[in-house]
Image (cartoon, rainbow, N blue to C red):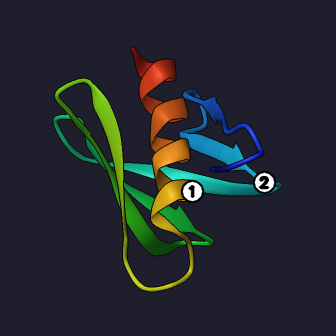
Amino acid sequence: MTSAAAVADVSSKTVTFAGVTYNIQDLGDDSYTVLLKGIPVGRIVLSFGAAHGVPEGDAISEDDLTAIGEAWFAAVG
């Protein structure tokens, strides 16, 4: 379980989590790439009303990506 709250900024297409700011890039309907300093670290997907994080490599955990996804999807409505 994560202890830090993720904060989404839709206007700048970013989510800040645990002191790190991630850029969010649209892939399609309810699917986004999460980038750290321009490098993709995972994807977030909204499926059946729930956010899911899918890491690409070991730069970030699935739980952290899911927290980022929950904040993002709550912000974009």
Looking at the rendering, in which quadrant would you find the C terminus? Answer: top left
Which residue extends farthest front? 1
The x and y percentages for residue 33 are 36, 58
Which residue extends farthest bottom? 57
Which amino acid lies under the numbered mark 2 shown in the image of this protein? Ala
Would residue 63 appear left or right of 7 to someone viewing this image? Answer: left
Which amino acid lies under the numbered mark 1 shown in the image of this protein? Asp
Q: Residue 43: which numbered mark, if any?
A: none
Which residue extends farthest top? 77
Label whose residue precedes the other's in the sequence (2 or 1): 2
- Judge whether 60 appears above or below 67 on screen: below
- Judge whether 24 appears above or below 61 on screen: above
Q: SS class of the residue under badge 1?
A: helix
Residue beneath the point at 37% across and 78% down = 56
The x and y percentages for residue 66 are 46, 48
Mark 2 in CB contact with mark 1 (< 8 angstroms): yes
The residues bearing labels 2 and 1 have C-alpha atoms spaced at a distance of 9 Å
Badge 1: how crowded within 10 Å, few (<14), some, or many (20+)?
many
Residue at the spot of label 1: 64
Q: Nearer the viewer, residue 12 or 58?
A: 58
Would residue 5 appear left or right of 15 to someone viewing this image? Answer: right
- Judge whether 19 appears above or below 61 on screen: above
Q: Nearer the viewer, residue 42 or 35?
A: 42
Residue at the spot of label 2: 18
Badge 2: how crowded within 10 Å, few (<14), some, or many (20+)?
few
Q: SS class of the residue under badge 2?
A: loop
Residue 59, by quadrant, is: bottom right
- Judge whether 49 appears above or below 16 on screen: above
The x and y percentages for residue 38 are 54, 72
